[in-house]
Image: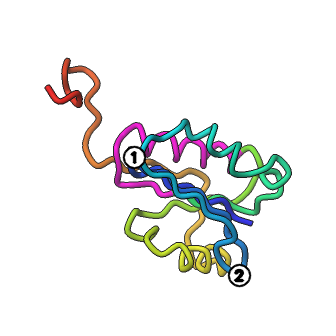
Amino acid sequence: MWLFLDTSSRSRLRLALFSQTGVERLQDDEGERRPLVALLSAFISHRELTSLTGVCVVKGPGSFSAIRSGVLIANLLSRLYHIPLVGISCDEAVDLALVAKRVHSRRVGKSKYVAPVYDAEPNITKKGVGRGA
């Protein structure tokens, strides 16, 4: 099984498990988001987590905080469990059945690290930026 993470939107979080036959389980949360770690622990059991064969993450583009959290968790799981890691764009993540097929057929480039792609440069030094000011 492959774990799929999509945190590319501030208001939506998608988690899925991919088997060789397609999307086994999907959780698509819209609206008020809970922390990623809480959703992930509710979505997948410890036994399933330790038997993963890969992690696929949407690397962006997306908001700084949203993308950063998903990519961080994906990189961490890949290193912790010594499993392949695949980063895809938001455009590629539209059709999850196709993504599941691609990761199992090995038609995607695996990497040791996925770098986040932000939709804008992060700006954490100016007061009021990002707060509607």
Q: Compute the Cα span from label 2 to label 1.
A: 29 Å
Magenta-colored span: 58-79
Q: Which mark is residue 102?
A: none
Closer mark to the observer between disc 2 and disc 1: 1
As for residue 70 lying within the magenta part, the answer is yes
**Foreground residue among 80 and 131:** 131
Which of these two is toward me, 55 or 5? 5
Judging from the image, the colouring scheme is rainbow
Q: Quadrant of the N terminus?
A: bottom right
At horizontal 35% and vertical 50% (from top left) the residue drawn is 62
> Where 80 falls versus 21 (above or below)?
above
Q: Quadrant of residue 42?
A: top right
Specify whether 112 is left or right of 64.
right
Mark 2 lies on a secondary structure that is loop
Q: Which residue is mark 2?
A: 21
Element carrying mark 1: loop
Residue 128 percent coordinates (x, y): 19, 21
Picture layout, residue 113 above or below residue 126: below
Q: Is residue 104 magenta?
A: no
Q: Position of residue 60 (x, y in %)?
A: 39, 55
Q: Amino acid at mark 2?
A: Thr
The image quadrant that residue 18 belongs to is bottom right
Name of the residue lying farthest toward the right: 47
- What residue type is disc 1 on? Ser
Q: Is residue 55 above or below residue 96?
A: above
Q: Give the answer, above or below, for where 123 lies relative to 21.
A: above
Most frequent secondary structure within the magenta stretch: helix
Residue in the picture at 34% in, 44% down: 63
Q: Which mark is residue 11?
A: 1
